[in-house]
Image (spheres, rainbow, N blue to C red):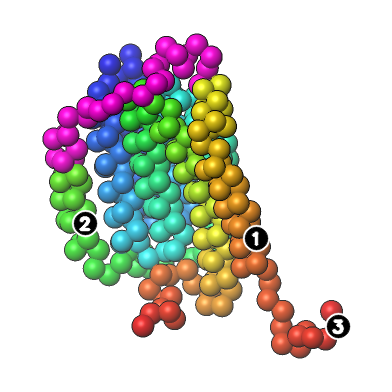
Amino acid sequence: MVAVFFAYFALVSIVAAALTVSLRHPVHCGLALLTLLLHVSGLFILLNAEFLWAVQVIVYAGAILVLYLFVLMLLNLKTDERYLHSSYPYFVVPAALGSVYVLFLLLQSPFGGVKGDAPAPAILEGGDTYAVGIKMFSDHILQFEIVGIFLLGAIIGAIVLAKAPRTMGDMGGKR
Amino acid sequence: MVPLSAYVAVSAVLFMTGLLGVLIRRNFIIVLMSVEIMMNAANINLVAFSHYLESMSGQLVALFNIAIAAGEAAVGLAIIVVVFRGKISTNVDEMNLLKW
């Protein structure tokens, strides 16, 4: 059963990614990206990461994608006649070869290693959100604070960049 | 039971698709969307290894990765708005002011 769901989520995410890259109209690309994000969140469910599923749906599909769509509507883009780079065939073949090579390298790896301290039954006992919270506020508290500062900087940067510039006549004069 | 290599294979294919999108598309917004595809591929990898190696840290890093993706989208789209205001275009080929 899990394999069936995995095959569905994996296939649809790959197809949606290909559509995001290849569709001509930017809004259609945004909708394909939405499909990709929702199916990736399905993969998170299969991996016992319910909290990340919620974060993916709320933050990615809810906030980031809406931001993209707002900008698309705001700019009112016309579809370009030539929407691909002029020499794109030269990139397609290296990308295909690259993915085959990466797959080859990954499948060579034994995927062994040191097991951590959070096996699936221990996580399921208190829930994934509980486990994430305990881990975040004990071992990863510094990263948490750094992400807070980073988001503050991103907010200030976005506001400063997108603020409408004052015209020359307004400079130093009364508003 | 789905093996770990299946998740890693999906993530590799998604990453290469996103990289291809960054390289071949000429619309700046679609280029940013391709970066989001690559970040999602990295997140799948992190969560899959976190599950199969029974450690919680992978999920935490994926969580921080999503936060960073949100910041990146906000700043990137602000840059697009600024560039569009001056040039009426989001074509990456026409943004060459900072080229040497």
Looking at the image, residue A77 lies above or below residue A63: below
Disc 1 or disc 2, which is closer to the eye? 1
Q: Toward the viewer: A73 or A160?
A: A160
The chain that hosts pointer 1 is A
Mark 1 or 2, nearer chain start: 2
Residue at image coords 84%, 79%: A175
Q: CA distance from mark 1 to mark 2?
A: 38 Å
Q: Quadrant of residue B6?
A: top left
Q: Are marks 3 and 1 in contact (CB under 8 Å)?
A: no
Say what amino acid the circle numbered 3 marks: Lys
Can residue A123 be found in the magenta stretch? yes
Tell me if mark 2 has few (under 14), some (14-19) or many (20+) residues whose alpha carbon lies within 10 angstroms of its own: some
The residue to which callout 3 is attached is A174
SS at badge 3: loop
Region of the chain picked out in magenta, as a range: A103-128
Q: Are marks 1 and 2 in contact (CB under 8 Å)?
A: no
Mark 3 or 2, nearer chain start: 2
Disc 3 or disc 1, which is closer to the eye? 1
> In the rendering, at what x and y percent does residue A15 appear?
32, 40
Disc 3 or disc 2, which is closer to the eye? 3
Q: Which of the numbered marks, if any, corresponds to residue A156?
A: 1
Residue at image coords 43%, 70%: B91
Q: Are marks 3 and 2 in contact (CB under 8 Å)?
A: no
